[in-house]
Image (cartoon, helix red, strand yellow):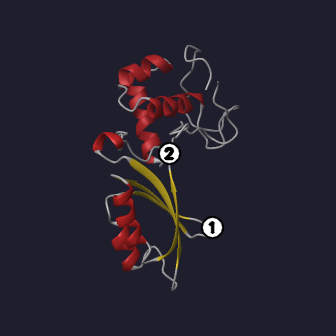
Amino acid sequence: MGDPGERLKDSRSHRGLAGDSPAGLDAIDLRLLELVQEEGRITLSELGRRVRLSPAAVAERIRRLEGNGTITGYAALVSPAHLGYGVLAFVRVAPRGGLTLRHPRPQKVLARPEILEAHHVVGEDCWILKVAVRDTGHLEELLEQVMTLGRTTTSIVMSSPVDRRVIVPIGRERPE
């Protein structure tokens, strides 16, 4: 995104400017997106200071980014381990009998609080579930329910050297 101290100018219109991202965002929008992803509790005043805009101008841009669906929400990142979930795992599921994620049986399983994410994917398996459980006994109990849907393959996470990254538009690289 460049040096945070570099001078960024507010563009009042949002027509395609030279150097705009493929998503139609200018340098200020991109910097704001980077900052709110890195520091979700950053104030409008601090955002304005970092991009050299007034808090009102920053608020207008943030509202526009929310309104057009670029910013989809805000959340606190919570450590599962601090809440008693000692094992993180990915469970791949190859459903049987033509089950889809919309069917009531998978919906009942997906409603379990241990299932943090569910993804419909292309490949040998159709679904990938990210789960957090207390221990391997808890994992076994969860898998017994998931296995009613089809064949499973489970991978327990040993560590996560890249836990979460700031996402930027395609074609732009984050500085080292």
SS state under label 2: loop
Query: Label 2, on which residue?
Result: 70
Asked which quadrant contains residue 6, the reply is: top right
Q: Specify the label residue 37 is tagged with.
A: none
Nearest the viewer among 162 and 7 is: 162
Closer mark to the observer between disc 2 and disc 1: 1
Nearest the viewer among 97 and 104 is: 97
Q: Which quadrant, please, contains the N terminus? A: top right
The residue at the point 31 percent across, 39 percent down is: 82
Q: Does the residue at mark 2 contact the one at mark 1 (Cβ under 8 Å)? A: no
SS state under label 1: loop
Nearest the viewer among 12 and 117 is: 117
Q: Residue furthest front?
A: 137
Q: Is residue 77 above or below residue 104?
A: above
Task: Give the image location of residue 62, x and y in percent.
Answer: 43, 36
Q: Specify the label residue 122 is tagged with.
A: 1
Nearest the viewer among 50 and 78 is: 78
Q: Residues within 10 Å of mark 2 (few under 14, many from 20)?
A: few
